[in-house]
Image: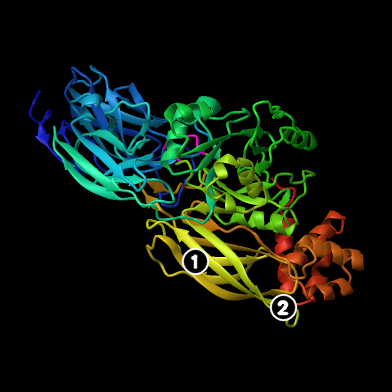
Amino acid sequence: MTERLFRLALSFTAGIGLFAQTDIRTQPAHLRSGPDREWSEFPAQALPALHQTFRAAANPTEYTLILRQRDVKLTPWKVLINGRELGKLSDDERDMRTALAVPAGVLRNGSNTLEIAPGPGPTSDDIEVRELQLYPQPVAGFLRQSSVTVETEAEGGPMPVRITVVDSQGVLVPLAALRKSDKEAVRTGVIYTIDGRTEIGLPAGAYQVYASRGFDYNAPSQRVKLKIGQKEQVRLQLRREVDLPASVSMDTHVHTLELSGHGDASVRERVITAAGEGLDMIVATEHNKMADYAEQLRALGLERWLTVVRGNEVTTAIGHFNIFPLRPASPVPDSRTQDWSALERSIRETGASVIVQNHPRDLHSNYRPFDASHHLSSAGENLNGRPFFANAVEVINSGATYSDVMQPIRDWLGLLNHGIRVAAIGGSDTHTVDFVPIGQARTYIEVGQLNGEWKSRPDAVFKSLAAGDNLVSYGLATRLRVMQVNPAEENRRSLVLLAEVYGPSWSAADHLTVYADGLPAAELKIPPNNKAGLKWHDQFRLNIPARDTTLVAVASGPGVLKPFWEVRKPYQPVSKDWNPRVVGVSKAVRVDVDGNGFQSPRDYAEALLQKHGSASPALLKDLHSYDASVAIQILSALAAKGQAPEGLKDSFAAQGSALKAAYDAFLAEWTKRGRQ
């Protein structure tokens, strides 16, 4: 073996320092598993596979291959040397290093070939690989060249936390959990630990170590530089930064590999990660199983930190529904039926007080619940004979985000305008320990006087959620309150509103929109800042029609790309461009202007139609005292009665720009019906 082929020089390449044998490839290689470019950030032309030759000496013992990967999604990308499969790239879109064992005898003296090639996958997958390096050391030894003991301190004593480790380039790194504890959950670059401390094995090199605990906490970090055989200690101070008044944090959509059959998380790991991300409550929503995690919760001694709820994701060919809470004796819904009425009846027979329509913009079993072919988003109306029966709908699913993050929120606003009492939900839909962190999108439920006693009254928590007394958080949280309702003036009402935006120091907001019956009514810019807790608040006036109105505030800001809380790319993208954003959605605030009971835009539309009978000049004249939300409900109701909106174009156009704009918006949706 020549010195050139087997150089024992200590290096710190890419932040990892160890005895390096061979650099197989340093430059990026862009690979594509199918014919279509997945993302505009990738080059138009890409390789179908990587074939790289390199020179090495035969390996008498196990060696370690390290490679850097990015944007790997669903396609199984195989890694081979000299035709021998070493393993697969991790199904993880983040920038990370993967360690693969090279068994003894795989390498040969002289020329060798490394190949990275895709297996069959459902869609095209653009990936990047670079910095492929071969080291003459078994993986177990490679990951234990040095060690770091991490201890976190927090008010109230030791608590479950997440520890994240990246190299000097910010890339997640393979590591070894040296405590060998069943009270930890470990993946590339991360360890969740229930007592706030851990011991980590790492190759020699330079690293950044973070501690975090979900949305409510700061994320302190410390740099370490390790030599072979060196032991270092890191102490990090955790601090609660967001404390929403009288609220319980909840992830209503979680899974495990153990019970749902895909992903990588066990039930034990699911409980550890939920506690480590600072959640108060989670619902076990395994596919078509009545499940809970209470046994593992007790075994780990985590009852102080976390409450688990028995639930089920009723997974059917006509939609997915999370239902909870369930009794042990609750009947299992019929997930095989495709009869809508039978499905609703089967779900209601369980006694669940919360029924969530999951990811309504996702395609499963060749069906998308809110597809434009049969769902009018602005009117909140299905045209396929399947009336909406859930009392909650996911507006943020951090495991299956939508290309336009606002579209599911607009869908919810349309349902509200239709008069459907439905709560907005945020959930993670996670099946993994780390790729989609549990609780990244979450729901904060207002519990009021039960603030310190909600664990003994979970029924009251679910009642509040079903009533829509909750916020949805995806990196931000937003509260909206009506402070004053002024007397009517020229068919208008002036409201004094208070908007508040919360978030940790590591997320930011730059914009707030207040919607009145689904229409943007106020746009406010938020000065960028790293304030923790209450980031911004303002009291302002808003004019609304002198009728009942639903108000919702949505704050947004730049997407968080921190290694401990990195937003995910869209699950089923409808665009090759991606603009990552975080959002916080307030609850729906209903303003009963006349005091005679709240009426929705649909209620007003039905009253106008009952008064006038059809889209007569008198009806259109009356519409001038309303707005586009009522006009859209008029058009939707007329269409439901068989009066095609195409014939009303001239009538609406003659009534001015506001009604013409409402007509044009409705017609744009209407013309998409029936198309798949």
Q: Which residue is mark 1?
A: 511
Q: Nearer the viewer, residue 210 or 361?
A: 210
Q: With 153 as the anchor, is 621 left or right in this view? A: right
What amino acid does circle 1 point to? His
What is the C-alpha distance between the residues marked 1 and 2? 26 Å
| Residue visible at 43% across and 37% down in the picture | 273
Query: Quadrant of residue 433 in the image?
Result: top left
Q: Dot 2, crowdedness within 10 Å: few (<14), some or many (≥20)?
A: some
Name the image quarter holding the C terminus. top right
Residue 115's spot in the image, x, y percent?
33, 29
Residue 557, can we see it?
Answer: no
Q: Nearer the viewer, residue 158 or 351?
A: 158
The reply, left or right, for residue 19 in relation to residue 170 is left
- Location of residue 492 with respect to 56 vertically, above or below: below
Task: Read off the residue under disc 2.
Answer: 492
Which of disc 2 and disc 1 is earlier in sequence? 2
Colour pattern of the rendering: rainbow
- Which x, y percent locates residue 201? 24, 32
Please, which residue is most extreme toward the left here? 3
Name the amino acid type tagged 2: Arg
In the rendered structure, the answer to whether residue 213 lies left or right of residue 409 reads left
Residue drawn at point x = 51 percent, y = 65 percent: 500
* Most common secondary structure along the magenta stretch: loop
Reply yes or no: does residue 435 show up in magenta.
yes
Q: Secondary structure at mark 2?
A: strand
Range shown magenta: 430-436
Q: Which mark is residue 160?
A: none
Q: Nearer the viewer, mark 1 or mark 2?
A: 2
Q: Is-magenta flag for residue 473?
A: no
Q: Splitting the image into 4 quarters, where does residue 64 fall?
A: top left
- Residue 289: x and y in percent read 61, 27
From this view, report whether residue 541 is shown above or below residue 318. below
